[in-house]
Image (spheres, grey):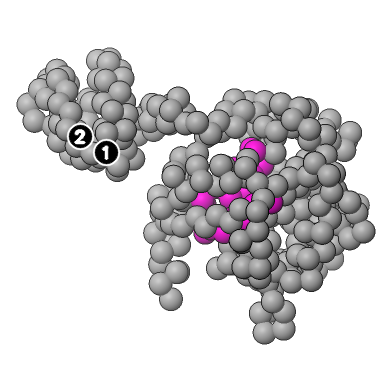
Amino acid sequence: MKLRLSFDGSRHTSLFGPCDNILKHLASRLCVGIVARGSSITVRGDDRLAKRASRVLAILAKRAKGADLTIVEVDKVIDDAIDQESPFRLSHYRGVTVPRTNGQAEYISSMLGNDLCFCFGPAGTGKTYLAVAMAVSIYKKSAGAKKIILVRPAVEAGEKLGYLPGDIDQKLHPYMRPLFDALSDMMRLDRLRRMIAEEQIEIAPLGFMRGRTLHDAVVIMDEAQNSTRQQMLMFLTRMGPNCKMVVTGDASQVDLDMQRVTSGLADAASRLADMDGIGVVQLDRSDIVRHPLVEKIVKAYGDD
C-alpha cells in the first residue's frame, strides 16, 4: 500500500529531527518506507503497517506544533498504536502488556492456547516478562488460577557465589531477581509482598518441586536451559488439575557442565513438540525488545 499525507513543511525539523533521525527511527520501528518531500509524506508498506504508520504520523504532526519531538515521545506514540491494535492484551494491576513483535504474539497465543508451552529465545526477547504477564493476567481475572508459582534452577552464571548468608528467601533472592523485577512492573510493591506472604505467589528453586502436585496454578520455569534431563522430567510431572505451565530458556546460555549432563530444555521440547496441548515457540533476534545494541551483541556472539 502507498499512502500520501500532507503536513506543514515549515515544521520539517521539529517533526523529523536533525538529519531526519526521527524519520529514520519511525521507518525502522514501523517497518515501512517513509519519504518526506516538501509538504507531503509518502508511506509504503504492508496495508496494516502503512495504515498504522499514517495514524502515528498524524498524531506526531499535531504534537510537533509546540516543540521538537524526542525519540522517547515517538516510541510512546508507536507503542500506544500497537497496544490498541493487538488482540493479545494481557491485563495486570498496572495496565496492559501486549506483544511488540510477531514472534511475541505467537508466544502469547501459544501460552493461552496450551496447558504447557516451551519458549526458546535469546536475551531480551521477553520470554520471562511475557510469561509473568500472562500468569498475572490469568490470576487477576480469577480464571481458575489460585496461585502463581515461579521456579528457577539455582545455577550460577559462570561463577561460584559460595556461601550466601540469611534465611532461604534471602539465599534465593539473587536467583529470583528477574522474576521480582517483572512482577514489580505489574503490581505495587505492597500487593506483591502481600501475595507472597499469603502464598498466592510462590517463588522457589527447582529442587523444591520434588514430590509436589501443582494444581489450580500458573507455573513458570525460567532459565530452564540450566535444568538437567532428570530435573525437567521431575518438574513436568508435577502438573496437576487446572495447571498451566510455561518453560522458558536460552540454549546459548547454558551454565551446566555439558560434558557431564544434558540440558533438559531442548530434550523435553524435542520429545513433546508434537503432542496436543503442548506448544513450542522459538523467538529470535528480530524479537529482541531491549536496547537496540542487544540485538547486535546477540548477533555478534551468535556468529561464533
Amino acid type, callout 2 = Met
Q: Choose between 113 and 43: the one closer to the eye.
A: 113
**Residue furthest toward the front?**
276
Please provide the residue range marked out in magenta.
Answer: 116-134
Whether residue 257 is visible here, answered yes or no, is yes
Q: Looking at the rendering, in which quadrant would you find the N terminus?
A: top left
Residue at the image position 45 percent from the left and 69 percent from the top: 301
Q: Is residue 131 magenta?
A: yes
Relative vertical location of residue 226 with respect to residue 143 in this rendering, above or below: below
Q: Is residue 34 magenta?
A: no
Residue 196 makes an appearance in the image:
no
Instruction: Determine whether the residue tagged by mark 1 lies in a helix, strand or loop.
Output: loop
Mark nearer the N terminus (2 vs 1): 2
Toward which corner of the image does residue 296 lie, by quadrant? bottom left
Decide: few, some or many residues near mark 1? Use Cα within 10 Å; few <14, some 14-19, many ≥20: some
Q: CA distance from mark 2 to mark 1?
A: 6 Å
**Label 2 belongs to which residue?**
1
In this view, the residue farthest toward the left is 38
Q: Secondary structure at mark 2?
A: loop
Pinpoint residue 75: horizontal percent, then vertical percent.
Answer: 39, 33
Q: Residue furthest bottom?
A: 259
Which x, y percent locates residue 166?
89, 53
Q: Position of residue 109 (x, y in %)?
A: 56, 42
Answer left or right for 50 relative to 179. Answer: left
Residue at image x 44%, y 45%? 102
User: Label 1: which residue?
Assistant: 46
The residue nearer to you, when weighing 301 against 273, is 273
Q: Position of residue 64 (x, y in %)?
A: 26, 20
CB-based contact (under 8 Å), mark 2 and mark 1: yes
Picture residue at 80% right of the left edge, 41% below the top: 242
| Image quadrant where one finds the C terminus | bottom left
Q: Looking at the picture, which amino acid does disc 1 mark? A: Asp
